[in-house]
Image: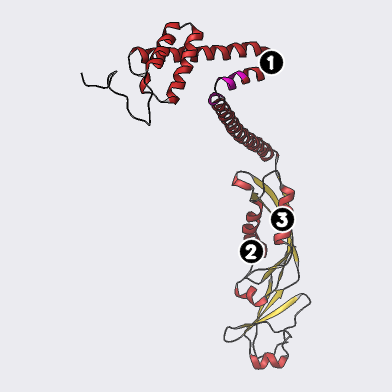
Amino acid sequence: MIRGPVLERKELRRLPFQRRPIAEPGTRLVFQMSSGQLVAPAHPYTTGDVWWRGPRAVYVIYTSPQPAYFTCTLPCAGDTLFFDAAVRFSFAVSDPVSVVREQVSDPIADCRRYLMDPLRAVTRKFTAMQPEAAERAIRSMLAEAPTDLANGLRITDLRVELTINAEQGQLAKDLEIQTLRQQLAMRTETDRIVLTKLNQDAELARHQERAAFHERLLSGGGAALAGSIVAQDPTKATEAAKFMMSLYDQDQKLAVEALKVIMDGDQIRLGEMDSAVQAVVERFKGMISQGGGQSMSNRIAGELSSAPERNDGAAPPASGDGEEP
């Protein structure tokens, strides 16, 4: 049976003489002085103290520890689900004067009001699937040392047992599965984005490598192209050789055609060319001879043999004899 902290209040008078109050084991005396002051002497007042100090009343306070128990619901993380909690603790009076001043009459209700907020703060850190972890946290954070309340009570030996009923348990499992699915979907999408980025980077790198390779290959001319063909397939060496010959024939044909156009249009007079240009013309003459352009080569040879020699870089005369017409 739970006892209230204030067991009794007695009025005191000087006359007629009364037996002085005596504190029984497990109790303390609180005297109310004539001024209204409350005093809880460490040692009991003697008869003389009672006479000279003149207290008006005395309160008998029960100070021994008492066990207490209550049940409640405590929120889980997210405040969607709740634990069923069985809270056990002991309480006692640590400050008799405060107990009298605050007129404590229901110590268990006072302790419950005090404990609810810190208990909720702890359980909100855990999901409905973690009751054991929440219990350990409560013991570590709230039950390691006694807790003194402002009204003079002290809480010790706090123990909390958390459970979750079948309905709440099923909801907790459903929420857990839904959370895992969301996390899996987010992880899958993240991995897909990363993989896509890696593939794009790899494709860009390959494209840049191919572009650089073909740029080097084209800058190397026909020989580089033919070498690339043979490197990829040695059996195509004959095709590579034919490819090179076709390129040579095309270059030769283009050169001959260009020279024909220039010579037929009288855009070059062989007598006005220096030795370097004449050497180029001689090369074209050989190409024309190999390609069957005999008339063009004869014309080039005739003009070269009939052109006067240039001396010291002087310009040739306008006519054959150098005289004005």
Looking at the picture, which amino acid does disc 3 mark?
Ala
Crowding around mark 3 (Cα neighbors within 10 Å: few <14, some 14 to 19, many 20+) is: some
**Numbered badge on residue 137:** 3
Q: Which residue is at the front of the view, 2 or 89? A: 89
Quarter holding the N terminus?
bottom right
Element type where label 2 sits in the image: helix
Q: Secondary structure at mark 3?
A: helix
Predominant secondary structure, magenta span: helix
Please tell me whether residue 139 belongs to the stretch shown in magenta.
no
Q: Secondary structure at mark 1?
A: helix
In the image, residue 220 lies in the stretch drawn in magenta: yes
**Tag 1: amino acid:** Pro
Write the residue at 75% across / 68% down: 65
Name the front one of labels 2 and 3: 3
Q: Earlier in the sequence, mark 1 or mark 2?
A: 2
Range of magenta residues: 217-226
Type of amino acid at the residue the image marks with label 2? Asp
> Where is residue 261 drawn, in percent x and y?
37, 13
The residue labelled by disc 1 is: 234
In three-dimensional space, the C-alpha distance between marks 1 and 2, rounded to whole angstroms, equals 97 Å
Q: How far across and down, in percent of the image, does residue 212 sit? A: 56, 29
Say whether residue 67 is left or right of residue 209. right
Could you tell me if residue 113 is visible in this image? yes
Residue 160 visible in the picture: no
Task: Mark 1 or mark 3: name the one nearer the start of the chain.
Answer: 3
Disc 2/disc 3 C-alpha distance (Å): 23 Å
